[in-house]
Structures are given as structure tokens and as C-alpha cells.
Image (cartoon, coloured by chain):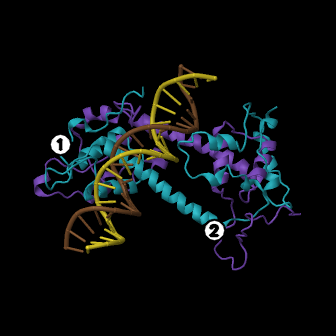
Chain colours: A purple, B cyan, C brown, D yellow
DNA sequence: GCAAATTAATGATTTATTCAAG
DNA sequence: CTTGAATAAATCATTAATTTGC
């Protein structure tokens, strides 16, 4: 029996879902409220990764005060959060590996000027092309590849005669390989 | 001794200002020219989010044709643009979420226990506490903004009698023994 | 129209996280 | 458990938009 459908609504304000004229309202999946997300994140930050079923139930009960939530939501949240943090970390590591040519980005913001003032004056010697549209998608960095021939004509740089010097289109391909 | 103030201001080479017109214009901070902004925005639209140092340098060099610019400006631009796009997105999501407030769907319960039993193994051994009201609100008072709605006000924790859910601060230590 | 005053954007810094190597 | 690496979030600060009184 589906007694679990407790018709729970935010305290007081009954923000009905799938109630009459249920045309567009998506009710298929849970979305954490700001407070719920904050608490979950706090727990995660505190080191919790694989909450026990006991913990999940407690957390769920507590968070239900802030809005509709079920144990499964808590469980999935931790699964997903853990996985995505790891994913993010891996991706970052890949990017870093890919771009660690000379300078470390360590203390990037604080020492940026120091790190970069030197190289600021260096000249880029490669032939570059700007706007390799659809080529930067970081979520698929593995397959990232610029098809130069596709973009050859998309040069957007247009300079005045006086500025035209050695200003070739920027091609960031070299940074990805 | 906070390691001295970060000498972050352009190291004396802030002579030329980007705005081509007039040479005496003040340039306390970089401001992208229209063309620079256009290029940066297009790069971002293409998916670029965390440009490597190499990329930053290339972009900076290219954009310097449109006006004064440094690598750090490019770096900061991407940091800020990314963060603010995300911010914008999150705000929209919150608003949407607030109005679509989904309802319970209970096909989970059985799957949940199944799924859970598999990952039940790990145990967190630390001491965790949910809703640490004190630490949330009292710590870092200097940075506290108007987060009053999130904590502190015990009124949040007062619910109706019919809902006898125990919403006192949850101490997960019980689960760790 | 035009500056002073006010508000909105956004550049630049600082702070708090994350994962995972040591 | 500690710390390196690299942000991303939060914040500070300055510039641009705009409003407003004249």
C-alpha cells in the first residue's frame, strides 16, 4: 500500500504539485531546498560519505522539516555528490596535467602578477585561430579536438589597418593536445 | 604579520591605459574593450571554462591588439564569468524549484534497501552533528550576513503538534558507535 | 543637457572547500 | 592525519549606468 504518499507540503504554504491543471509542473524528482542542500553539504564537509541507513533516516527526518524529502533522496544525494566531487577532481587533474608546461598555477591568484609578469611579454609564435566553436567543452575533454578546417573561415578578428601586424587567429588546439 | 599587503597593482607598468582615446585616462583596473569582451564571451560560449596557463597567455596576447590587457585579466575574467553564470543559473533553478515542489513518489523503498545494503559497509568514525546551531551562527561573526533565516531563530524548529517528528538537533554520534 | 548622487556590474582578493598524495 | 594542488565561493572595491535636481 502506498501509505508513504504523505502529501507532505511545505509547512503552511501548500504549494501543490500535480494538482489540478497539472500540465507543466514536474513532480518526478526531488530537488533539495536551499536549507536542505546546505545541511547535506555540511554533513558531507564534515566527512560523511556513506551514511548508514540509520543516519539516512535521521537526516531525512530532520530535513523533511525544510521541505519534502525521502530517505532515498538522501541516499542518492550522497552517492551523487561523492561521485561528482571525484569526477570533478579527476577532470581538473586531467586539465592540469594537460597544461602543466612551465609554470605551476600554485598560488595562482596571490602570485599571479609575479608568475605572469615575466611571461606577459613573451610572444606567441604559433599560428593561432580564435573561436574554435564547440571545441572547448570541458565535460568531454577526452574527445576534444578542433577541426581546423572547419573554423578556417570563421575568423572574427578584424583589425584596422594600423593594428594588423602579426595578429593571427588564435588556435587553442595546442593547449589541448 | 599577514605577509605584507599583496603588491598586486601592475608593478608600475600601468602607464598605458586600454582606452585608446586620450592618454591620461586613469586605469585603476582593467576594463575590457568591446572587442575583448566579445572574444572572451565567445570563448566562454564555446565551452572554455578553466583556461590553462598556455591558453590564458595566448588569449591575452591576442586580445592585446584590442587594448591593454594582461594574463591575469583573462584569468580573472573567466573566474568571474564562470562564477556569475553559475550564480545566475542557480538563482533561476531555485526559483523554479520553489514553484514546482514535487510530491512523493514511492517506488523507491524497496530499491533503496537493496541498493543500500551493498554500500552499507563503510563506516564513518568521526563525530558528526547535524544542525550545529551554535557553530553555524556564532562562528565567524564578522562575516555573518543576513543568514538569520537559516539558523539561530528557534522558531524555525517549532512545528505543529500533529507532526511529531523529532526535529531537535540531530547528533549522528549515536550512529557511529 | 549635465554633473552629483545613487545603483548595478564586474574586476580583483581573500577564504574555504575538495580529493588524494605522502 | 597532514598537506599540496586547484579551484569555487564569498567578498571587497572600482568602474559604468542610471537617476535626479537643477
Chain hosting mark 1: B
Q: Residue A50, located in which quarter of the rendered image?
A: top right
Which quarter of the figure is the C terminus of chain B placed in?
A: top right
Name the foreground residue: A27 vs B131. Answer: B131
Q: Are marks 1 and 2 in contact (CB under 8 Å)?
A: no
Looking at the picture, does residue A13 appear above or below residue B170? below
Residue closest to the far left: A162
Looking at the picture, does residue A83 appear above or below residue B41? above
Q: Looking at the image, how many numbered discs can be counted on the residues?
A: 2
Badge 2 is on which residue? B99
Which quarter of the figure is the N terminus of chain B placed in?
A: top left
> What SS does tag 1 mark?
loop
Residue closest to the far bottom: A21
Residue B34: x, y in percent? 26, 59
Q: Which mark is residue B15?
A: 1
Q: Earlier in the sequence, mark 1 or mark 2?
A: 1
Instruction: Using the numbered discs, state the Cα–Cα distance from disc 1 to disc 2 in whole angstroms.
Output: 52 Å
Q: Which mark is in front, 1 or 2?
A: 1
Amino acid at each position: 500500500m502506498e501509505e508513504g504518499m504523505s502529501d507532505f507540503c511545505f509547512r503552511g504554504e501548500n504549494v501543490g504539485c500535480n494538482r489540478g491543471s497539472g500540465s507543466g509542473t514536474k513532480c518526478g524528482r526531488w530537488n533539495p531546498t536551499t536549507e536542505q542542500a546546505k545541511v547535506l553539504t555540511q554533513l558531507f564537509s564534515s566527512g560523511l560519505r556513506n551514511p548508514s541507513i540509520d543516519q539516512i533516516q535521521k537526516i531525512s527526518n530532520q530535513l523533511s522539516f525544510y521541505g519534502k524529502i525521502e530517505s532515498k533522496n538522501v541516499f542518492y544525494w550522497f552517492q551523487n555528490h561523492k561521485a561528482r566531487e571525484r569526477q570533478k577532481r579527476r577532470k581538473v587533474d586531467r586539465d592540469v596535467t594537460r597544461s602543466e608546461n612551465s609554470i605551476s598555477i600554485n598560488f595562482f591568484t596571490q602570485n599571479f602578477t609575479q608568475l605572469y609578469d615575466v611571461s606577459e611579454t613573451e610572444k606567441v609564435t604559433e599560428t593561432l585561430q580564435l573561436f574554435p566553436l564547440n571545441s572547448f567543452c570541458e565535460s568531454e575533454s577526452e574527445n576534444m579536438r578542433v577541426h581546423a578546417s572547419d573554423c578556417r573561415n570563421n575568423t572574427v578578428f578584424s583589425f584596422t589597418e594600423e593594428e594588423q601586424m602579426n595578429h593571427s587567429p588564435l588556435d587553442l588546439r595546442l593547449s589541448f593536445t
